[in-house]
Image (spheres, coloured by chain):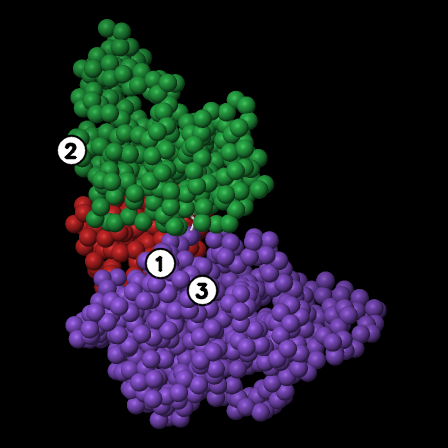
Amino acid sequence: MLDDLLARFGKRDRLALARLLTLVARGEHLDAIRLALAAADSAASRPAPPVVALTGNAGVGKSTLVGKLAEYLRGQGQSVAVLACDPQSPLTGGALLGDRVRMPSRPDDLGLYIRSLAAVSGNQAVAEHVELMIRLLAGFGFDVILLETVGAGQGDTAVRELADVVVLLVQPETGDELQWEKAGLLEVADVVVVHKADLAGAERMESQVRELLTLPGCREITVLRVSSTKQQGLAELWAAILACPRHDARVGDARALLRRAQQVLAERFADRVQRVGPVVDRWKRHELDEAQAADELLQLLIR
Amino acid sequence: MATAVDRKLWSQWQREIEAAPPGEQPATTVSGVPIDPLYTPDNLDGFEYDSSLGYPGQYPYTRGVHATMYRGRLWTMRQFAGFGTAQQTNERFKFLVAKGQTGLSTAFDLPTLMGLDSDDPRSLGEVGRLGVAVDTIDDMRQLFAGIDIGKISVSMTINAPAAVIMAFYLANAQDQGVDWRKLRGTIQNDTLKEFHAQNEIYFPPEPSVRLAIDVIEFCTRHVPQWNPVSISGYHIREAGSTAAQELAFTLADGLHYVDQCLARGLQVDEFAPRLSFFFNAHNDLFEEVAKYRAARAVWADRLRNHYGARNENSWKLRFHAQTAGCSLQDKQPEVNLIRVAYQALAAVLGGCQSLHTNSMDETLALPSEHAVTLALRTQQVLAHETGVTNTVDPLGGSYFVETLTRQMAQEARGYFDRIEALGGMLPAIERGFFRREIADAAFAFQREFDAKHKIIVGVNAYQEAERKPLDILTIDHAVETEQVAQTRRVRKERSGEEQRRTLDAVRRAAEAQENLLPTLLDAARARATVGEVMVALAEVYGRCDAAVV
Amino acid sequence: MVKCVENQIPLRIVLAKVGLDGHDRGVKVVSRALRDAGFHVIYPGLWQSPEAVVRTVADEDADWLGISLLSGTHMTLVPRIVEMLRAAGLDHVGVLVGGIIPETDVPKLLELGVARVFGPGTPMAEIIDFLRAHGSRTHA
Ligand SMILES: Nc1nc2c(ncn2[C@@H]2O[C@H](COP(=O)(O)OP(=O)(O)OP(=O)(O)O)[C@@H](O)[C@H]2O)c(=O)[nH]1
Ligand SMILES: [Mg+2]
């Protein structure tokens, strides 16, 4: 079943991609999927697509801007995958995933893929295992991956490790919310977008942000005014995103290293990995007891 | 009002009521407002007849906008009609006129309401289904062919493309040789509530309001007997709001229109007398009556004291009411007749100027002729048999109703403050305030219903196993084909050059933020379609096709 | 067929408003009720074309599709959607229809493969129980 899925995925079957994303979201078959991707990666040697995260308070226009960026990029002929996170109730596990509403897509346009994800609120800015989903989408061949977080606050540092570029959205007239933004700005953002620039107060907001960024110890951060409604500033935003050094220096290298290690492991162990399954099967059929099975698995590893 | 309360008698009653077992359902209104077992003068602190209530036909009009109310003249019984092609609706109109109806009320189909032409792929299956399809001035001409629109009052329920449809109507009136100053009627033209509730949305909020104001401004100057807007709470309530939200959001919309008209340089007394309202008539009799009474008082106060209107007609809130479509059930549909009758009673006790009673089968389809007749008869029985018309504001002075009226006014003012705190109408829309409030209320009601705290007869109580389907009216699919062919024919016949030239002018006027009616009239005469005009405007205004959960 | 226990693997359901009518009271109430019952509800907004609905169901790997319709166009739009789901290899997705559906049309919709039609006045528990009882055919 999984093999079949992976095979179909390799043939760029979109339904297989969708199903694999579900499995990953549910935390199933993670290792096997990781291995399969690593093997495929080493074969393809395609440069990894840029991963851009958009974060910011609820209602600041993340989904809308993701939608506009996607449209802009499609206009440039790039294919785009979107992972859009909305909060999940920690009590019931339920979630209302409404980001798509703001991301119009043409149903016949296969160059755009949108997936809604639930993230346990208060915990994380994105759904679990997003890093693997990103790799799936990259493996499928999308040129750009856009990630919408549930909103700014906790967990943003994790986003920084997932994405090459983090765009923080703020909007005019949010005087009292500037507090966390101060902290958030310094920590995570590569680009700050003063969104809804069509509204009054955008310029004032921009100068406030710039002022904050003159504080000692701040990194170089681009500040831009963008209006999704008026379609203004999208090209500039994308240029600014591309101009950001990917987090290569730190995270990027680490990610590359990790990926390489996974490739090596996949190559080295490819034959043995195939032998893990049969051992487990025999254990399932009661041909082996737990200790024997564990022993055999260990043998595989240290041989 | 009597104020003396004998404390001893009161506590005796209080003891008795405390000893009594509580009822099965909590005593709350349909909006969830808790109701006391008894109202007394205690509830009406500081209530003085002259200053707090006054007389009908006098400020603040709590008791009604006319001195004599229904003793002088009954409310207008106005039933909404429209289906299929313009020709079919025209035939229905003529039939109604022949039967002595003095006002016509036009329902448009969904594509027209959404600003789409009949041959747009998105219109598939919807053309002529819930109303009449109007794509070009040719359809408008057909719709009113042989009807003297200089004599009869015409109401048109349309919002996002209201300015375009108004231009069609005015251009057609000219063709028919009818002086605009003679035209009487109403166009709904209330784009704000579409953002709160009904979702017939085309442009973003700001240009949507600008278009609505264009119509108000133009009519104020050139079509003086026309009601250029019907500020509507009906759809807000249908979307699940409470009565107080319906009241508050509707009045807030009205106040926003007033502000925008003033910003155009109109004088308040020029346009305010022509602002009209449209409310829902829901199940909770006393709550509804309180809502209408509070509406008049709050509006009069604002217009007089905040805007400084001097013309008494500017202070008067006149309203049309329609019974609550959302209260109709598809189980045991005949029971709807009874619901509608009580709802109509509420509207009349609340002093409506005109009333539409829903037909019992309206949840299922377009009303059949039998059902429409019964709906009209409901109003006639109310008017002629029940005696409720004999005296003005019969519930006035009731401790309960006066208390509810006060609470309702207070709640509305509380909402005005909250909207203000969000930065005003448009920022509040932009933040999803209205939608959230309404959705919360709808969800709260659903939970009450699921828990059987609120009973709906035949649905979560007194169900019947057997259901006999009603005979319902269905629309022939041929209507769509015919209408599409008609529109394509117009496209072929007309001068493409004229059409392009006039649409360019519309675009330029929109860019220059001029009143669009003059250029829309030219586009109408050049036989541009509703869809073409809307697309041209969207190039300037942008489109708004997102909605929030 | 996997029966989903509350709080375990959440079922994914796309709730779609198709056609031009903007009456979203029902779909919003159902969305919230399902969320509170532990489902993952994907709401793509108003005015969805059949093509868009099918694309959403496919890309979101939904277990269920709920179609909400109040304008009376169900006999035009639902058959198209069901047909398109089939053509897209999504037969495993369960289809529900909610809204004002005349009695006489209900059997026709069931015939097409719609799993259940929910009319106005349906208690939320009925929808929730139905979905829980049927679980997922996607993740069998
Ligand atoms: N004026 C203006 N409003 C905008 C703009 N972009 C988005 N909005 C509005 O902002 C509101 C919120 O937009 P969303 O895109 O849903 O915001 P979000 O950040 O994704 O919200 P969550 O997912 O709930 O955190 C909506 O009402 C949008 O119409 C813009 O450029 N200008
Ligand atoms: Mg969002």
Which residue shows up at 51% across the image and 54% down it? Answer: B427
Q: Which residue is mark 3?
A: B210
Type of amino acid at the residue the image marks with label 2: Lys
Name the spot of residue B33 as percent of width and height, x first. Answer: 60, 62
Which residue shows up at 38% across the image and 63% down it? Answer: B510
Tell me which corner region of the image, top left, top right, bottom left or bottom right, holds residue B506.
Answer: bottom left
Question: The chain coloured red carries which letter?
Answer: C
Which residue shows up at 26% across the image and 61% down it? Answer: B122
Circles 1, 3 touching at the beta carbon (< 8 Å)? no
Question: The chain coloured green carries which letter?
Answer: A
Question: Which of labels 2 and 1 is toward the front?
Answer: 1
Which residue shows up at 30% across the image and 79% down it? Answer: B140
Tell me if B396 is positioned left or right of B455 in this view: right
Q: Is residue B319 visible?
A: no
For the residues beneath circles 3 and 2, the answer to whether they share a chain is no
Q: Secondary structure at mark 1?
A: helix
Crowdedness of circle 2 by 10 Å Cα count: few (<14), some, many (20+)?
A: few
Tell me if B449 is positioned left or right of B6 in this view: left
Badge 1 residue CB within 8 Å of ligand 1: no
Question: Which of labels 3 and 2 is toward the front?
Answer: 3
Q: Which residue is mark 1?
A: B540
Crowdedness of circle 1 by 10 Å Cα count: few (<14), some, many (20+)?
A: some
Q: Secondary structure at mark 2?
A: loop
Question: The chain coloured purple carries which letter?
Answer: B
Name the spot of residue B500 as percent of width and height, x first. Answer: 24, 67
